[in-house]
Image: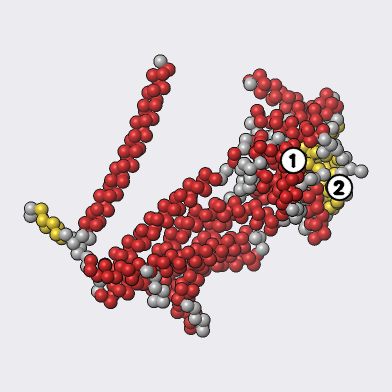
Amino acid sequence: MAERVLSRTELVLRQQERQRYLFGVQVVVWWIIILGLLIFIFSGVTLTIGPITITTIDLDTEFMKTWAPYISWGVPITLYIAAFSIVFASILALASALARLSGIPPLVALSGFYVSLIRGTPLYLQIFFFFLALPQMGIQLPGRVAGITALSLNYGAYMSEIFRAGIESVSKGQREAAIALGMTHGQTMRRIVLPQALRLVLPPTGNEFIAMLKDSALVSATGFVQEIMWRSVKVGRANFRGLEALVIAAMWYWLMTIIFTALQARLERHMARGER
Amino acid sequence: MPIVEIDDLHKSFGPLEVLKGIHMEVVQGEVVTIIGRSGSGKSTLLRCINFLEQPTHGRVTVDGLSVLVEQHKLTKEQKHIVHEIRLRTGMVFQEFNLFPHLSVIENLIEAPVTVKRMKKREAIEIAEQYLHKVGMSDKRNEFPNRLSGGQKQRVAIARALTMQPKVMLFDEPTSALDPELIGEVLAVMGQLAKEGMTMLVVSHEMSFVHDVSHRVVFMEEGIIAEEGPPEQLFDNPQNPKTRMFLQRIIGEKEEAEVEG
């Protein structure tokens, strides 16, 4: 009797698992169908089924073959800008979060002011500030430096909250244990709180990096940084092939996002396993 | 000469006065347990000794180092003395508070290396002795998340001991443990007491309080209501509040045993 009950439970569980699996398979199949449809739309094929004729978008493949390498050379530059910017943004975010939590009025004010100012103005404006406004004051930054500065300052402000939450989520007991062992506040922060907080903020920082990859395209508007977007707009305009050029750029951004999102997911799983 | 001396200690949290003038002396090698209802101020008293809570008023003396708190802000000199007091007191918390990003051995040597500037090799040597003492040598390289509650607490005790303190403060060390894990921690504490460590223990484990401590302090509403050797306090309490508290605790225990 008991055996039959057990096997029935097992059967239900197995069936549920199978349903979940089939659901997953269906989603993947539909992904492939939608992707196929997208490729079809851009295939240039003219399809006639009885009275209906479907005309698809005809891309200039010759142009794409010629200019794809040129646009693709923007990829390392985009990665370069995003990588440097995320590093500086993290440093700014950490400094801003520490200032915010310091309990020292001028530092708390400075941090709040920075976050408010940056979040209260568009990223687009901030980028142009470093390209257009600074030279007027006699400060001329090289294109990439200006772009990285603007992106770092912008993301630093948004990430400041992430870092603050990370630091605050380390329990009070951790600090107390360190203090009771005779550690100073500085030692407690450096040796006990920050190592734990940084582990917590690593996955969300990965997310910010992925967003940064795409926001770095805004830097192209200034005309001084030859990343993916700048290159694709340039050759697109010169040859009246904007569509083709943008398709190439879009494919790169999408591909990079997919790759880094996968890496990010692995990182997150790894982190979840390590802690507690 | 007492190794811990507390003189007219007051502590308020805002309008709430938690400690209302505590006097207490602990001599070297003495084991003093503090009992009382939750909210009676036992933990706060313990935490005032190493200044995890800063007293509102009063004097704390540990191993000849004395801080007299008269105003809100401590002077630079007093802060220095507080630091010295912390080096001479080890604390064990209810929630263990092991550092989760460090292995067991790293937990133990962290403070000796960063605070005492001890050579890493030397610190490891000392740490290994204490790990052995608490029976955790084989978990040397594990991370805290792989340990049971009882194991965590034994490591936490070893961590405090590795700083070679003169006084150990135990703040409800077994309250967060599953019942079957309490014994191993109490055994380590009993052994420590036998070796002559000066200990102040806040605990609800009446068997430990009765068998191990030299003196029991019963706190009620921020003052010491009664104190004395465990036999006297348990068998012949003078204060009716002590009697009520003990009856309730023993009653609960018997109830639990009947249910269990």
Answer above or below: position of B89 versus A39: above
* Left or right, A36 with reference to A221: left
Residue that carries the numbered disc 2 in the rendered image: B63
B74 vs A274, nearest the viewer: A274
Number of other residues with Cα within 10 Å of mark 2, as a class: few under 14, some 14 to 19, many 20 or more: some
Residue mark closest to the camera, 2 vs 1: 1
Which amino acid is tagged 2?
A: Asp
Name the amino acid, label 1: Tyr
Residue B196 vs A199, above or below: the answer is above
Q: Is residue B5 left or right of residue A137?
A: right
Residue drawn 72% across and 51% down? B120
Q: Residue at x 24, y 57 (%)?
A: A39
Tag shown at residue B13:
none
Query: x and y percent of residue A59 in the render?
Result: 22, 65
Residue B82 screen position, x and y as percent: 79, 53
Looking at the image, the residue that sits furthest to the left is A51
Above-or-below relation of A146 to A4: below
Q: Between B245 and B44, which is closer to the camera in this rendering? A: B44
Residue A251 at what x, y percent from top left? 32, 61
| Percent position of residue B26, x then y | 86, 40
Q: Which residue is mark 1?
A: B130
Q: Is residue B32 left or right of residue A149?
A: right
Position of the C terminus of chain B, as image quadrant, is top right
Quadrant for the N terminus of chain B, please.
Answer: top right
Visible in this render: residue A112?
Answer: no
What's the chain of the residue with tag 1? B
Please indicate whether residue A87 sits to the left or right of residue B221 in the image. left
Residue shown at the point (33%, 42%) measured from the top left: A24
Q: Secondary structure at mark 2?
A: loop
Give the farthest residue toward the top: A1
Whichever of labels 2 and 1 marks the residue nearer the N terminus, that label is: 2
Which residue is drawn at the image coordinates 80% and 27% (left, top)?
B211
